[in-house]
Image: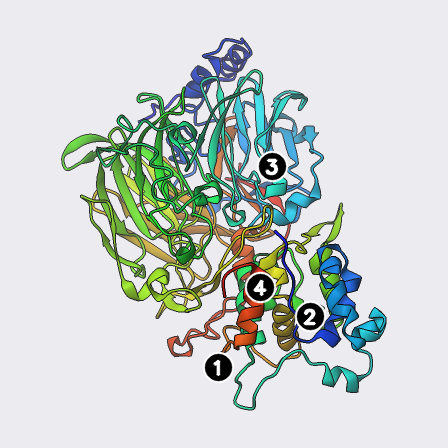
Amino acid sequence: MPFRVFLFRTALLTGGLIAAGGFAAAGFAQDKSSDPAAQQPAANAAPAAPAAAEEEKPYKIAPDGTVDWAVYNGFRRYNGICYVCHGPDGEGSSFAPALVDSLKTLSFDQFLETVVNGKETVNTASDKKMPALGSDPNVMCYINDIYAYLKARSDGAVGRGRPAKFEKKTKDYADAEASCMGTPG
Amino acid sequence: MPRLLRVSGTALALVLAMAAVPTIASANDELLKLQKDPNQWTQPAGDYANTRYSALKQITTANVKNLQPAWTFSTGVLRGHEGGPLVIGDMMYIHAPFPNTVYALDLANNGKIVWKYEPKQDPNVIPVMCCDTVNRGVAYGDGMIFLHQADTTLVALDAKTGKVAWSAKDGDATKGETGTSAPLVVKNLVLIGNSGGEFGVRGHVSAYDIKTGKLVWQAHSMGPDADTLMDPVKTTALGKPVGKDSGISTWQGDQWKIGGGTTWGWISYDPETNLIYYGTGNPSTWNPVQRPGDNKWSMTIFARDADTGMAKWVYQMTPHDEWDYDGVNEMILTDQKFGGKDRKLLVHFDRNGFGYTLDRVTGELLVAEKYDPAVNWATKIDLKTGLPERDKKFSTEANGEDVNSQGICPAALGSKDQQPAAFSPETGLFYVPTNHVCMDYEPYKVAYTAGQPYVGATLSMYPAPGGDHLGNFIAWDAEKGKIVWSIPEPFSVWSGALATAGGVVFYGTLEGYLKAVDAKTGKELYKFKTPSGIIGNVNTFTSKGKQYVAVLSGVGGWAGIGMAAGLTNPQEGLGAVGAYQSLSQYTQLGGTLTVFALPD
């Protein structure tokens, strides 16, 4: 089933998608060409200086704790799929790393590359294997949200469990979601 | 009840020698004999009836306090170790999670490794195993050890040499179909069930010829009658014919093709009725709104003819599941008094929190009561219709997509998962390892892609209201449907129990304790902390005339996912926040067998 990932933060993300290859690359080549920011090499898109990283925060959290829809939906999607290995709220399990720690050093590009293509460390001491999720719409249509949520967790901006207050889903989001998932909006 | 049969060394050798004679009925006859010999542990569940009871009584309520570790053995594998070893004669067979190593140890020779088997499997199977890379054990029959590998391969190994006699591929791991269940040998057949309900796999049980590995029959959980091996007239549900294509008629469109109902639990067998019994798992996806209908025959107890696979009766416990309450837990077959009459019973502790007692010949529902008082999704089960009376408040279907239904008990883990209970014919009680965990559950729309997760709900789990513990080990009266005694445990009890004629019941805990309690009172008599958390099943056997108790430790499984990080409690009002410390503060990974004995 063909589907497209929809991007809300194109400038931040397209570099990563190209690097990620697989299903993403074909679907995004067009989006990218129309976006000047995306012409930059992938390496430049990764957070470098603290000041830049500050600007590139993929989440918004209001002073009263209200999280944006991305973080809220990221929580839902993460805890519906990723948690079976990475544990509740990104805290890790007996056999997969705690992403709240991993995202302290992992760039978005590296994160996306791993999600799309998977990762394998299978030897005498370890049998860690991350699946390639690049063809899974339930993951890829929401990858920005999942990243936003995990980054917010990793930065300590949101705690464990379900965020109590969150912004509503916008119409634009719902339309993009329907188009990505191939379902009526 | 099995008669106690003390077998001398010579007689035992004779039994084993007879096993080598290749006649079709031999495996069955041999296993029927072997299961009566308490000196050996010849089936994953102890016996065909899945009682996990041993007639051994050297270890008693009086002396168990002196128990001590006699020897240990590392499997060399880190992840979750479910199941337990077999003991056939002087040989012990130990299995491990992926890569599914099997060891044969010579008990007469200080546990020397006689052979080791390690299959080469594509590591891509690792992440499509929903809840850790567990395996629930090997089976023995006809001089062979049968291993159901993660990649769904069923392999027959010569019990003496470990040499591969045959192998058969049961499913397609690239579509998320995996193998975790222990095989069961019945007559000339080796039976296995499949895993992968979280990937939209369609459940089935397969029967392979013990000599050749050829598929003899395969019975799906849903689909047309030809797939489900059901007769519209002769197959009954609570006494009524199921009708034509009952495995399709309660599904929307083609959804049954990715309908779940996998069969990863335990299979039991009654040689008198020649029926096998097992349960089916959750319908896929976890989002109930997306799959209207009763979703038959997910969440169902099946009674099938062992030779042909034809279904005799079915009972669907949780029609149109809304909570992931798989029905795969073991079916314990007992001959007990019920209402003053001798009945052939089937007792089942379902994930949905109800303990069911049925007539295993007819499928009549006799008792259905909560075995954890916290259970709230249904008020009761109507014994006539078999239907649960659901509480709307906890219905994730009624509340709908994108709504977080709160405070549902039990959690998706169930009041009990696959960790098998035990039955003692002496007390007439069942000993049940349980979870005491509740959840919030929010279903949402998902799309199906072959080989990718097909889940469709976000869950958070937390201790049941008012409690400060996540598990109980209980004694259950299946006639009355009542808890007799209950031992609170800080974490879910995820280990299979063992009941013995010595009046002692054994189980393991997630922190790693092997515990021995009094079968009558539940009083703790002994505990020892093994190297890692226990999700394996306890067994017992003799070697050189001395009774041993053995258990695999090695934390992991679903318990390792849900609890390694500690549970959250989003409902601040319940006051349990901070009452828990994470399991990782008590135990770490590592597969080890610990064998216990009384001092000489």
Q: Which residue is mark 3?
A: B172
Q: CA distance from mark 3 to mark 1?
A: 43 Å
Query: Whole-percent x and y of residue B134?
Result: 57, 44
- State whether residue B505 is above or below residue B454: above
Q: CA distance from mark 4 to mark 2?
A: 33 Å
Q: Which residue is mark 4?
A: A179
Q: Are marks 2 and 3 on the same chain?
A: no
* Label 1: which secondary element: loop
Q: CA distance from mark 1 to mark 2?
A: 24 Å
Q: Residue at x 52, y 48 (%)?
A: B535
* Label 2: which secondary element: helix
Q: Which residue is mark 1?
A: A165
* Label 3: which secondary element: loop
Q: Are marks 4 and 2 on the same chain?
A: yes
Q: CA distance from mark 1 to mark 4?
A: 27 Å
Residues under numbered marks 4 and 2 in contact, where contact means CB atoms less than 8 Å apart: no
Pick the front one: B559 or B452: B452
The answer to whether residue B500 of the structure is visible from this angle is: yes
Q: Which residue is mark 2?
A: A101
Along the horizontal axis of the image, is B179 left or right of B227? right
Q: CA distance from mark 4 to mark 3?
A: 30 Å
Whichever of callouts 4 and 2 sits on the residue coming sooner in the sequence is 2
Q: Nearer the viewer's eye, disc 4 or disc 2?
A: 4
Query: Whole-percent x and y of residue B20?
Result: 55, 12
- State whether residue A17 is above or below residue A161: above
Q: CA distance from mark 2 to mark 3?
A: 34 Å
